[in-house]
Amino acid sequence: MSAAHLSIELPELPPEAQTLRQEVRAFIAEEREAGRLPPPRKIGLGFDREMSRRIGARSWIGMTWPKEYGGQERSALERYVVTEELLAAAVPVGAHWVADRQSGPVLLKFGTEAQRRAYLPRIVTGDLTFSIGMSEPESGSDLASLKARAEKIDGGWRINGRKIWTTNAHHAQYMIILVRTSEATGSRHEGISQLIVDLSLPGVNISPIVSMANEHDFNEVLFEDVVVGDDALIGKEGNGWNQVSAELAYERSGPERWLSSFRLVSELVGALGPCVQSASQEELGRILSHLLALRQLSMSVASMIQQGKSANMEASIVKDLGTKFEQETVRVVRNIVSAEDLTANGREERLRALLIHAQQYAPAFTIRGGTNEILRGIIARGIGLR
Amino acid sequence: MSEHRIFFRETVERILADALDKADIDAAEERILPARLYEALNENGIPLMLVSEDKGGIGATVADAAAILRAMGEASAPGPILETMLGQQLLASVGLEFSPGLISLVFVDGIDVPELGATEWSNATVHAVPWGAAADHVLIVARTAAGTQLIVTNGADWTATPERDAAGEPRDNLSARSLPVTVIALANGDAYLRAAAVLRAAQCLGAIEWAFRRSVEYTGERKQFGREIGKFQAIQQMLAELAGHVLACVGLVEAAAEGMNPQLIAAARSRLGDAIDATITITHQVHGAMGFSLEYSLNSRTRRLMAWRDDFGSTLYWRRMLAREFTHLQRDEFWPAVADSGLAAVG
């Protein structure tokens, strides 16, 4: 069958997933009741350590991981259900997000037994925040050109270099950093390794980067002669590129790729009455259909991951479609707000604030986690063009 | 996919390979139905597949029929096969005697139709009836102030003015001074509209898949500037974008046909509208001037997409339907309604 035959299996949600969905909704209702979940005025993942601990107490972090490391051995689809419910309700999950989604899975897949025991049980309680050390000032889409290096020393590694766009580095205890550990002789993808770094070590210097949405999520992290032990190496020396490729599939297919602007749509629907002009219905119907399509795809990818299938191209498609959808959503909400005159004279003040923030934030959707042009390169390879 | 469905799909793919060629597809523009194809479909009981077994059919599901229509769309098979399949189910469901032959089917809204129980329709007119002049039976599902009714007519009793759709297939205007009719109340007219909509969606999906696959192949064949055009990033980016549309529609159309959930069906038709725009634009752009000739097969798919996209409820109609499922909700009710509408298959 030609590579250009695209197919996807329909996800089958196990009955436990439905029960779980109700449990998550009940949790969200409790949080709202207790006043710990005010309706947001911003989009993006909020950071709230205590919230992450409460979610951890429900066993919803690292829930697919083996029980011996604190996991619940639940399915990828069950994790998917928890994730989408939390995101749709705008629960601030930023404190555990990266660790749950990719750092933990990387440690499980490539880490040593000692590393798993050291980190995973503290991730599942919501106590540990991880950050991702991939991009550098001179290495964006061309990640393999990275300059940060770790030099082998007696008993460990000495790290020098600069990482950028590091979300939550100012809150995180650890970073999984991608560094060059030896010169590439053939492919540039050789000689790259992943190390786990305690961000409180001497020589680590974290400085904020304020985004155009006027927020401090990102950081630049400078490493000057930072010394870590041999036990900091994840997986095999020189195998970092392959490890990162696997990690990016987790990063790209999740519902966060099409749910970050969802709260804007909820707010819009809440503000609209049942009597809406035809043109507004058509615009809203259109984005809802894209949302439902993305959700089907995202669930299918979770199902593929569950079955151990490679979903690199499908994950790239989810992110390409999802992020474009999010930008479209902002435009459509703006149009409907205008057509229905929803925010005039101080009405729907929260919707207005959210819309302003979403517009400022929207350019990032199609850049973070791999630009859409890079993703389409991966898709083109998947359909046999490269 | 169930064994049943794989069997149906393989049967129809075999029939299409044996009994349909480019000349048959082209002949449809001369109002000639591909006779070999329809004979083979009849021999295999395909037109009756949606009729229950106790009434002489196969008792297949809409999702089974969708799998077949997807293959038919991929092959750009002409003729009112969807209309015949669904028409036979309609006739059987209201208890009318089975009658073989070609059926055309239209859904109408806001035109004058005879009352329930009437036997004659004076000054009858319906427009854009697929293969209207060729059909043995013309079924009209009419939404009226009094409810939805099914009007059963004989094709031979109409006078046809030949018209055509964007693919060049007949869409005739039919009229009659005095027409014998059977008019029956249809309790679940909207369910039939949804079935027709999702089946047309499957046909469109098949055409999209063919156009996408052919375009990817073509970029490996066509050379300019000394290399295959598929090596150029500009081409790769366009086809990657189209791949996203294709995969999104595969997931949504399959889930909609499987669950027959009203929200997912409306969503599938809405999402397809954008995918069809992208398919027509990108596959033709990739093919350059070659794809614009009548002789090259790409247009047999893209023109069918133009013809089919607004059948059984336009793209905009389905968008309005989808929005109306949600606009009355409060902010915190919205997500649960979205989440609960998408459960494709609960194991």
Image (spheres, rainbow, N blue to C red):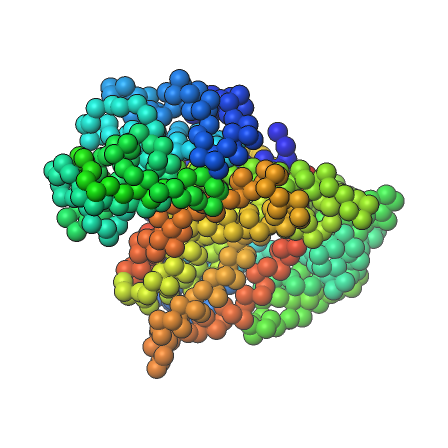
Residue at the extreme left of the image, as rendered: B117
Residue at the extreme top of the image, as rendered: B43
Is any atom of residue B193 visible in this view?
no
Count of numbered tags: 0
Say which of A304 and B305 sits in front.
B305
Q: Is residue B39 above or below residue B155?
A: above
In terms of image quadrants, where is residue A161? bottom right
x and y percentages locating residue A79 in the rendered image: 47, 44
Q: Residue drawn at (37%, 39%), measured in percent from left and top? A: B130
Residue at the extreme bottom of the image, as rendered: A345
Say which of A192 and A121 sits in front.
A192
Position of the C terminus of chain B, as image quadrant, is top left
Position of the N terminus of chain B, as image quadrant, is top left
Say which of B211 and B120 sits in front.
B120
x and y percentages locating residue A376 in the rendered image: 64, 50
Q: Residue drawn at (57%, 61%), measured in percent from left and top? A: A365
Q: Is residue A210 above or below residue A150?
A: below
Q: Residue drawn at (32%, 25%), measured in percent from left and top? A: B101
Say which of B152 and B345 sits in front.
B152
Q: Is residue B124 left or right of residue A133?
A: left
x and y percentages locating residue B184 in the rendered image: 17, 37
Q: Residue drawn at (46%, 22%), measured in percent from left and top? A: B36
x and y percentages locating residue A291 in the rendered image: 44, 52
Is any atom of residue B112 visible in this view?
yes
